Amino acid sequence: MNVLVVGGAGYIGSHCVRQLLAAGHRPVVLDNLVFGHRAAAPPDVSFYPANLGNEKEVGKILRKERIELVMHFAAYAYVGESVTDPLKYYFNNVAATLHLLRCMLGAGVKKFVFSSTCATYGTPEKMPITEDTPQAPINPYGQTKLDVENALKALARANGLSFAAFRYFNAAGAAEDGAIGEHHDPETHLIPLAIDAATGARPPLQVFGHDYPTPDGTCLRDYVHVDDLSRAHIAVFDRLSAPGAALFYNLGTGRPTSVLEVIRAVEQVTGKKVPYTLAPRRAGDPPALFADSTKAQKDLGWTIRYPDITAIVASAWRWHAAHPQGYARS
Ligand code: UDP
């Protein structure tokens, strides 16, 4: 299938591009390189450095490349920034996505795969989180993703759009061969920061909160390998053939892992100590978030090849060891 990967030079999008190629599809990348890296997309894949909200440009690409399905990874995703600068998030994550969708419908492209998030659930009372857990985001980032989910439902009913929205838990790790990986600027995620603390590339890690009602007092999260995430996006293709399909799936391993357990995994994999300090809680961090992904496993035959945090961290370490500065500036 000819697939436009919006945000295909970003962390999850670039891994998905490689998985698409491996599965025999033809990805085309659109990325404005605000956060993406040109080097993260294979040089022989068509690349358009455009904005997803530019209907004229995107319309041309959809027609020229005979696109049949669009995958959309291009969102801003810093929770704290979404609280201080919500307009930026509503414009990019909601408004620009609506332009993309209008453009798709205009060009007759009616299959869509959307990166959503467990942040749409807010702070649920019960764990693990199923797709039926009530959605109540606690920050504008989560709200923008939920707003798009709701728009998609309406477009499925009114326009016959078929879509899958994947609610990611904590995307982590890197491609097995270490060729592409996670490079955010600024970096706020636990695993890359812990690795950099171990190598001395950054200051000691701050562990945000150690008095949570969890076994070791630190937050529990569900780290899911980026290649596992990517494979689900392709496994859903068959289900998007029926017009108006509206599909929602959680993607996580279902295994809660604490911050201290991640630190231990980084120490084991790198053979280095992770220097850290115990710091106050970070605003907006729920004590525990982990998924029930039974639905994706049953419906899509989705399998988790990296159920174990050590293997996930090992893949992240391969990328970091080979690219200590991340990607060259693009
Ligand atoms: N965390 C931490 N120190 C850091 C970054 C993150 O203790 O420098 C904790 C954070 O409080 C959360 C977990 O690590 O409990 C995962 O955070 P991350 O930012 O990687 O992902 P999030 O769960 O916020 O999407």
Image (cartoon, rainbow, N blue to C red):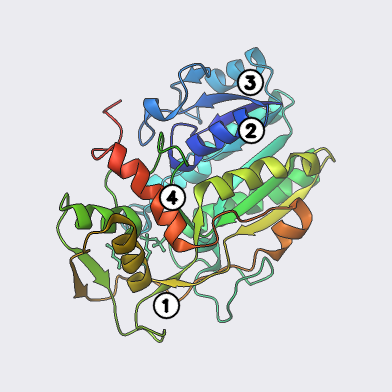
Label 4 or label 3, whichever lies nearer to me, is: 4
Q: Residue at x 76, y 45 (%)?
A: 156
Q: Earlier in the sequence, mark 1 or mark 3?
A: 3
SS label for mark 2: strand
The reply to whether the C-beta atoms of the residues labelled 3 and 2 are less than 8 Å apart is: yes
Residue matched to label 3: 62
Residue matched to label 1: 287
The reply to whether the C-beta atoms of the residues labelled 1 and 2 are less than 8 Å apart is: no
Q: CA distance from mark 1 to mark 3?
A: 43 Å
Q: Earlier in the sequence, mark 4 or mark 3?
A: 3
In the rendered view of the protein, which quadrant contains the N terminus? top right
Judge whether residue 99 can be spotted in this image. no
Residue matched to label 2: 70
Q: CA distance from mark 4 to mark 3?
A: 31 Å
Name the amino acid type tagged 1.
Pro
Q: Residue at x 48, y 19 (%)?
A: 48
Label 1 or label 3, whichever lies nearer to me, is: 1
Q: Residue at x 29, y 77 (%)?
A: 209
Few, some or many C-alpha atoms within 10 Å of disc 3 (few <14, some 14-19, many ≥20)? many
Residue matched to label 4: 173
Name the amino acid type tagged 3.
Leu
Quarter holding ligand 1: bottom left
Rendered view: 238 above or below 212: above
Q: Looking at this view, is 4 or 283 the one in front?
A: 4
Name the amino acid type tagged 2.
Val
